[in-house]
Every structure is written in C-alpha cells, then in structure tokens.
Amino acid sequence: MRKAIAAISLCLGAAWAHADTIVTKTDDVVHGTILRLRNEKVAIETAFAGTLRIPLDQVKSMDFDDASREKTFYARTDRENKAKEEVRLGRDAGGNPILIPVADKAKALAVGDVQTLWPADAEDPDFPPIKPWSFSLSFGLNGNSGNTKDFSVSTRLEAIRSTERTTLKLYGTYDKTRSFNTLTAEQYIGGLDFEHRPSDIASWYLRDEAQHNRFSDYHLRNVFAAGYGHYLINRTVRGRATILRLRLGLSHSYTRHYSKSFAGSPNRLKESDLGLDLGFLFHHDFECGLGWNTEITYIPLIDDIDSGTLTHETRLTYTLRELRRFSKRLSDIALEAGMRNEYKTDLDPQYCNTDTTWYFRLRKTW
C-alpha cells in the first residue's frame, strides 16, 4: 500500500490545461476526469472508453487540472468508519501533495493516510445513501417433506423502508401445492418486522405474522412479538455486510381452528397463548458475490415451557450483477436457494412434528 501511495504522490502535482491526466508505468497516458481513489484503484472517466479503473501500483503519475483544484473533496482515513473530512487539494512548503481540511486550513492531511478520496458532489463510494424504499418480487419452486411430500410454486413480495436507525419490512407470500393434479395446499402469509436502533449494538423491535391455509386444521394463526435486539456484529466493509444479531422478547400466539376439525369441542376452536420470543440472525456477504443468511426463531409457551415452535431458514443468494455480463435492468435479478424447517412440539406420537421446505427462487429487486 505504501508503494501504491508513493505512486500517486504526484496526484496533486502540475495541472494539465484541459483534463485530469494519468500516466502509467508503461508510459500510457490517459486523459479524462478522475472520479475517485478507492480499493487501491483510481477510477477515471474517459471520452473514448468510459470509466477505467487502474491499479495504483501501475500508476506512474497522476495530475489534476485547474478546475479540479477548485473543487471540494471528501477524504476518509478509515473505510469502516463513516467519519469523513471536507478537503481541498494543495501542496506543502516542499511542494509535496497534501489535503487541506476546509474546517481547519492550518491542518494538513497526508495523502498516504487517505483510504478513499472523492468529489464532494458525488455519492459516497464507501457508504452510499440508503434508498427510502426497496422492493423485491420472487417466484419459486418449493418442495415439502415431513407431514407431506409434494411440490409447489410460490410468490413472495417484500417492501423495505430503511433509514439510519430504523428498518420496516413488509412481506407477503402465497404458496399453492398440487399433488397428482389435486390442490392439496393453499397458504397465505403476511407480516411486518419493525426495528429501531438507538445505538450501533442495541435495538428494540416488534413483529407480527399471520397465516391462513385452506387445507390445514386452522383458519387463522397469528404471532405478535416485541422485545430487545442486540448486535454482536454489525459492519459493512467494501459494500459487503456481516451481521450477527440476537433477540429476546415476549410473544402472543392466536390460533382459530375450523369448526369441522374439532366437532363437538367448541373450547378447542380458539387458542391464545403467551410465550417468549427468542431470535438469532446471521448474514454475511462473501467477496465472490454470494450471500449467506440464517435465521432461527424459537417461541416457547410461558405456561408450558416444553411446548413451542422452532422455525429455521437458511438461504444462499447470488446476484447476477456479479457476472458483469448483464444490462442494468437484469443486474438486480438474484438466484436464491434455501430451506425452511418448522418444528412444533405435539403430544400425539403419530404426528410428524417437523416440516421441511426447500426452495429455488428467482428474485427481482428495484
């Protein structure tokens, strides 16, 4: 890195009259507009080849034109920290390039200490602004084993609103299953998950999920939960996130059964239970563009701690933009593969307590 920084020591050197200039170690000269320094590469926009990204260890010299010297830039010395300084280009008494903070012109920032440098009127390359709303629509092929063995198709719609400290996720899923041309399952799921983070490690949340299945013994099942969340890991490096989060809260489960399921037993038509809400979430984005997500939720009943529901879901996601061969419209399409397990304690030994659903999805995000 030091050698790379030395290679750009002339980045604030003599101005070129009409454009920024980069000279490589092979004496190739590139004219254009230098966009940023990041990832030990310099990005320059040219008229003949679009945006080029040149490794800094291949740069012999780099000069800004007079217009660039009048611009205001942002500099960041730690790419994992959002803190940044507003700077201008300058020289010290010995003619060496320096960055002069606008807030304190008597202070000089060495070029070698800068991890990222970009124009003040451009988007932050390390921490791009969060879109207020993002949407995704996915279609998938599912398979079930456990209580049933069949195949199905599903549709899922998600809407997520994010700010610096809050996240609201709304989602809906529709699953339809046929076995030998006979409709055997038709399930609707809708829910929300709201989280507020007063600090980087602490949060409070509330969530609610309702299910309806025409072919099960219940007409409606709803789970509401609220509590405290704690982030053991929550960082983003080079646009790739790693999250490890725990949740602890209280829950209320309500189930309304079909009357035909419990003929002559009206007291079994409705069930209302209080329980705990224990959650675990792990998410990691790999360098290759593959994302791993695992979420586990356990809801034991307070009045019968041995009874409860354990739900697990793990999925792998690959976004087509990583292939760099698709247009911008197709770059937001992702391939997902995963499995979901649901375990319910039940005293009936003839009932299989575990349902396992595996799926393949094609997801479009906008």
Image (cartoon, rainbow, N blue to C red):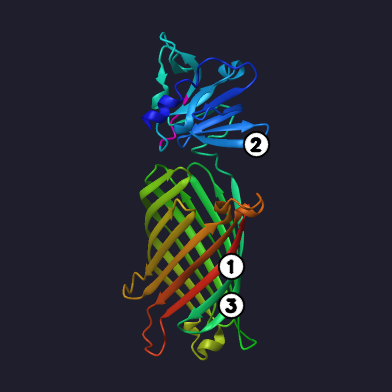
The magenta segment is 81-85
Residue annotated with mark 3: 152
Name the mark nearer the viewer: 3 or 2: 2
The relative height of residue 365 versus residue 27 in the rendered view (above or below) is below
Depth check, mark 3 against mark 1: the one in front is 3
Q: Point out the image quarter for the N terminus.
A: top left
N-term-proximal mark, 3 vs 2: 2
Q: Secondary structure at mark 3?
A: strand
Foreground: 360 or 159? 360
- Disc 3 to disc 2, how far (Cα)? 48 Å
Give, as a three-letter code, the residue at label 3: Ser
Name the residue rendered at 57%, 34% in the picture. 123
Q: Which mark is residue 35?
A: none
Neighbor class of circle 3 (other Cα within 10 Å; few <14, some 14-19, many 20+) is: many
Pinpoint residue 336: horizontal percent, then vertical percent: 53, 64
109 vs 15, left or right, is left
Disc 2 crowd, CA 10 A, few/some/many (<14, 14-19, 20+): few
Element carrying mark 1: strand
Q: Is residue 195 left or right of residue 325?
A: left
Indicate the position of residue 96 as horizontal and vertical percent values: 43, 15
Horizontal and vertical percent position of residue 51:
61, 36
Q: Secondary structure at mark 2?
A: loop
Of 363 and 95, nearer the camera is 95
Q: What residue would you read off at disc 1?
A: 173
**Type of residue at label 2?**
Ala
Residue carrying label 2: 49
Mark 3–mark 1 Cα distance, whole angstroms, equals 13 Å
